[in-house]
Amino acid sequence: MKAKEIGLDWESPIKREIWHYAQNKPELVVEDLKPFVLEEIVRESLLKRGINKWLANRALIIRLKHYWKLKINALELEKWKAKAHRDPKKYYELKGMVKALTSCRNEIRAICKGPRWIEWDKDRIKLVDYVGNQKKWAIRFKKLFEFLMSYNFENGKEAEESKNGK
């Protein structure tokens, strides 16, 4: 059944980019389902299933990413001041901090900029619109996604390694 047939003014994701849709607010889901389900039921389901929590967490992660950018810029400035004052210990300490924080920020950035058309196959995440996307963030997201999905947190190895007995 197509969205227009049931009264929703949506188009197929193939025809339209996700960026055209407002998102990240539980109220939008409530409005979308209002013609079919009581508001209270939708709100309760969003609350029980943790969707409100994750939308709030997403907003906080984006703010954290921006904060880290400001922190990286401040550390860069301190780093160059240390170099100008011929303080190699402080310079290399700050250089390491910048490198570590930049690495963390890039991973968070890849997650935040990841694809929005994602489906679930039972308990597994499926990337829907990912084939052929060669943007830098898209490649980083795909690598991070594949790594995190294959990592075995119980024994500290990637799933492939543990399957192959390495």
Image (cartoon, rainbow, N blue to C red):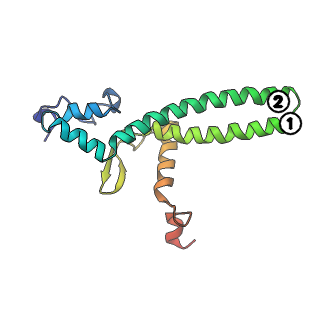
**Mark 1 Cα-neighbour bin, 10 Å: few <14, some 14–19, many ≥20:** few
Q: Nearer the viewer, residue 42 or 11?
A: 42
Tell me, for residue 12, which label it has, or none: none
Pointer 2 and pointer 1: residues touching (CB < 8 Å)?
Answer: yes
Q: Residue at x 47, y 53 (%)?
A: 146
| Gap in angstroms between the C-alphas marked 2 and 1 | 7 Å
Residue 1, quarter of picture? top left
Tell me, for residue 82, which label it has, or none: 2
Image x and y of residue 156, in percent: 56, 63
Task: Tell which circle, 2 or 1, labels the residue nearer the N-terminal end.
Answer: 2
Name above or below for residue 151 compared with residue 76. Answer: below
**Mark 2 Cα-neighbour bin, 10 Å: few <14, some 14–19, many ≥20:** some
Image x and y of residue 3, in percent: 16, 35
Which residue matches tag 1? 88
Look at label 2 and name its amino acid. Answer: Ala
> How many marks do you count on the picture?
2
Image x and y of residue 29, in percent: 25, 35
Residue 70, quarter of picture? top right
Judging from the image, what secondary structure is the residue with disc 1 in?
Answer: helix
Can residue 123 be seen at all in this image of the molecule?
Answer: yes
Q: Residue at x 23, y 34 (%)?
A: 30
On the picture, is 7 further left or further right than 64? left
